[in-house]
Image (cartoon, helix red, strand yellow):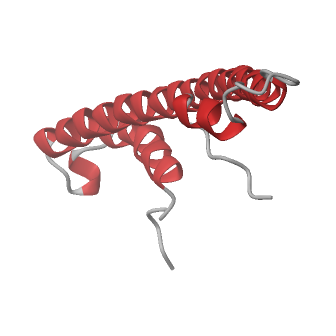
Amino acid sequence: MRVLPTNLGEMVQFCLDRYPVWEQQTKSIGLSPEQVQTLIDLSKVAREKMAAAEAARAAAQAATLAQNAAAAELRSYAAGLIATIKAYASTAGVGDQHAEPEGAILARAQIPVPRK
């Protein structure tokens, strides 16, 4: 039977729960005060690092949401500009025999000319 949990959080909590008892019972359970102190120190560091990792995950999640919102806003705005350029290109100089071809306007805007 496994005594020490395999799950990281449960394992850290196991050690945090045990060290006060082990600290009081060092000699009667075969441990030295130094061993228990090391367990205390390692348990506290692990708990701090877990909290820092959780905070980093939360920050990364928030940053990803902000990134996606900004990208969606940019996509919408850029699509509107492209639609404006295409509309301008398709109607520029209508009825004018010296009008610039639609493809030239789109090429100048670096927008692919639609296939017909």
The front one of 62 and 56 is 62
Task: Name the residue: 60% across, 24% down.
Answer: 62
Determine the image quadrant of residue 99: top right
The residue closer to the viewer here, 2 or 116, is 116
Residue 42 position (above or below residue 100): below
Residue 42 at what x, y percent from top left? 25, 39
Which residue lies at the image location 65% right of the left edge and 40% below the top edge? 103
Q: Establish if 23 lies above or below 70.
A: below
Locate residue 76, reporting x and y percent.
76, 25
Q: Residue furthest right?
A: 95
Where residue 104 sits, quadrant-wise, is top right
Rendered position, 2 above or below 99: below
Residue drawn at point x = 40 percent, y = 28 percent:
52
Taking the spot 40% from the left edge, 46% from the top edge, the residue there is: 15
112 left or right of 18?
A: right
Task: Kindly give the residue lying farthest to the front in the view shown.
Answer: 97
x then y, percent, for residue 93: 79, 21
Q: Nearer the viewer, residue 113 or 77?
A: 113
